[in-house]
Image (tube, grey):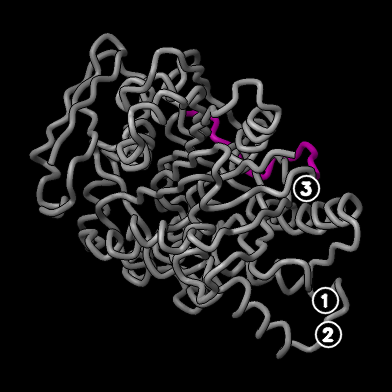
């Protein structure tokens, strides 16, 4: 069968952040719980940033380094988001426009909490592998904003902000997907929801239980489909949806014990080797919803010492719930390509916010999805938080007759 997979991958994680210790102190949270959370920093959006700007700012570098012929072969754009701006029109329509892509292109939006981007990726992989349009490429973008405040309690420090853009095609420099090698598991449960444009609710205990349950069952289904597959030995590295690093460590420990590993020392060593590299960036950004797994994949590739090729097992979970475990081969050139984006450098460039800054900005951030007919955004109010060497960013300028208008700023 034809080799298809991820040709390019890039994450945009905002231009500002807050230290999680400062957020714990400001909210009066139990500092002893920081260790279990495993979160160090949290990316914060500004009032001119929304799911459209996040998606475009993540995808723009990928699109711009394609030559005109390659760019024209992007025949589908799929956005995955819990942060839609319209009950009918997709975020992808704005993204397609501001990336200046061909009008001979499908675009649409999908939604299934944090699983959505993986579902879109797998549908795109099937389309590409079938070669219905030889040489075609598909752009999948997981993009979300945070809708949390003090009411979220311990979920507030772990909720991230940003987007990851994934270019799929027949020259998978980053990850060649193992076709037919996957395991799925899904059922209905209300472990989290966004019932309004300003509210993000969660049943934390139910969500964590479903995350762990789905991991066991997706891996089991994978092993039934793939002869001789074994969680402990078939994958050189692992990357998982990361609501927070602590749950990933607990999930790994659960699977290793179910696989017969009883020594905690051996389990910890395996975690450090196979999973720790994938958590470097998530610990600094927070949960990016459906982009979370792919931020973890980018972190893995940029922070592992392996030069490739090597097989990675990937676990995607979305509340509600739908989950999948699949695998692929990271190529020998992937690390060099990822280093070209320099996500670590861009995270270092972000402006650190104080707790007072954060709370002052919070009302505007929570209002960004409000379905208002008209609104003007004062960029000058945020200029002090944007690093001078950030480069061009798409920013929300105004809403006019419910139509969102964006402009490029530097």
Label 2 crowding class (10 Å Cα cut-off): few <14, some 14-19, many 20+?
A: few
Q: Nearer the viewer, residue 152 or 57?
A: 57
Mark 1 or mark 3, which is nearer to you?
3
Residue at the spot of label 3:
182
Q: Which image quarter is the C terminus in?
A: top left
**Magenta span dominant secondary structure:** strand
Element at label 1: helix
Q: Quick check: 20 above or below 287?
A: below
Q: Quick check: 68 above or below 352?
A: above
Left or right: residue 92 versus residue 63 is right
Residue at the spot of label 1:
257
Picture quadrant of residue 211 = bottom right
Q: Are marks 3 and 2 in contact (CB under 8 Å)?
A: no
**x and y percent of residue 65 in the render?**
32, 41
Element at label 2: loop
Q: Are marks 2 and 1 in contact (CB under 8 Å)?
A: yes
Q: Earlier in the sequence, mark 2 or mark 1?
A: 1
Residue at figure coordinates x 46%, y 71% from the top left: 303
Picture quadrant of residue 297 = bottom right
Q: Quick check: 76 above or below 187?
A: above
Mark 3 or mark 2, which is nearer to you?
3
**x and y percent of residue 116 in the render?**
60, 37
Q: Quick check: 9 above or below 280?
A: above
Magenta region: 184-196
Residue at figure coordinates x 72%, y 66% from the top left: 235
Q: Earlier in the sequence, mark 1 or mark 3?
A: 3
Left or right: residue 223 versus residue 100 is right
The label on residue 262 is 2
Residue at figure coordinates x 40%, y 49% from the top left: 11
Q: Are marks 1 and 3 in contact (CB under 8 Å)?
A: no
Residue at figure coordinates x 78%, y 48% from the top left: 181
């Amino acid at each position: 069968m034809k080799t298809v997979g991820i040709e390019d991958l890039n994450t945009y994680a905002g231009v500002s952040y807050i230290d999680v210790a400062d957020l714990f102190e400001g909210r009066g949270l139990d500092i002893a719980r920081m260790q279990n959370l495993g979160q160090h920093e949290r990316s914060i959006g500004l009032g001119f940033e929304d799911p459209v700007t996040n998606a475009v700012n993540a995808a723009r570098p990928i699109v711009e380094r394609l030559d005109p012929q390659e760019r024209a072969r992007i025949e589908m754009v799929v956005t995955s988001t819990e942060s839609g701006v319209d009950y009918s029109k997709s975020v992808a329509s704005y993204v397609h426009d501001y990336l200046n892509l061909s009008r001979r292109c499908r675009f649409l939006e999908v939604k299934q909490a944090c699983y959505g981007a993986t579902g879109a990726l797998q549908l795109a992989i099937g389309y590409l592998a079938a070669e219905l349009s030889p040489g075609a490429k598909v752009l999948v973008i997981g993009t979300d904003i945070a809708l949390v405040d003090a009411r979220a309690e311990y979920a507030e420090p772990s909720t991230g902000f940003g987007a990851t853009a994934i270019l799929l095609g027949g020259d998978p420099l980053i990850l060649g997907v193992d076709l037919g090698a996957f395991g799925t598991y899904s059922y209905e449960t209300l472990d989290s929801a966004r019932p309004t444009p300003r509210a993000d609710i969660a049943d934390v205990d139910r969500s964590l239980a479903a995350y762990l349950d789905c991991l066991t069952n997706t891996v089991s289904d994978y092993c039934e489909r793939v002869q001789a597959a074994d969680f402990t030995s078939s994958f050189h590295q692992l990357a998982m949806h990361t609501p927070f690093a602590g749950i990933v460590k607990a999930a790994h420990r659960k699977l290793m014990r179910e696989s017969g590993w009883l020594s905690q020392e051996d389990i910890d060593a395996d975690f450090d080797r196979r999973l720790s590299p994938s958590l470097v960036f998530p610990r600094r950004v927070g949960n990016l919803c459906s982009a979370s797994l792919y931020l973890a994949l980018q972190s893995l590739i940029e922070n592992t010492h392996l030069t490739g090729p090597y097989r990675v097992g990937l676990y995607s979970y979305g509340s509600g719930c739908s989950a999948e475990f699949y695998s692929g081969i990271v190529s020998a050139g992937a690390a060099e390509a990822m280093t070209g984006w320099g996500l670590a450098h861009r995270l270092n460039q972000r402006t650190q916010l104080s707790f007072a800054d954060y709370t002052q900005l919070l009302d505007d951030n929570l209002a960004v999805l409000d379905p208002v007919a008209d609104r003007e955004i004062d960029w000058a109010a945020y200029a002090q938080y944007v690093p001078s060497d950030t480069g061009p960013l798409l920013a929300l300028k105004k809403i006019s007759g419910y139509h969102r208008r964006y402009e490029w700023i530097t």
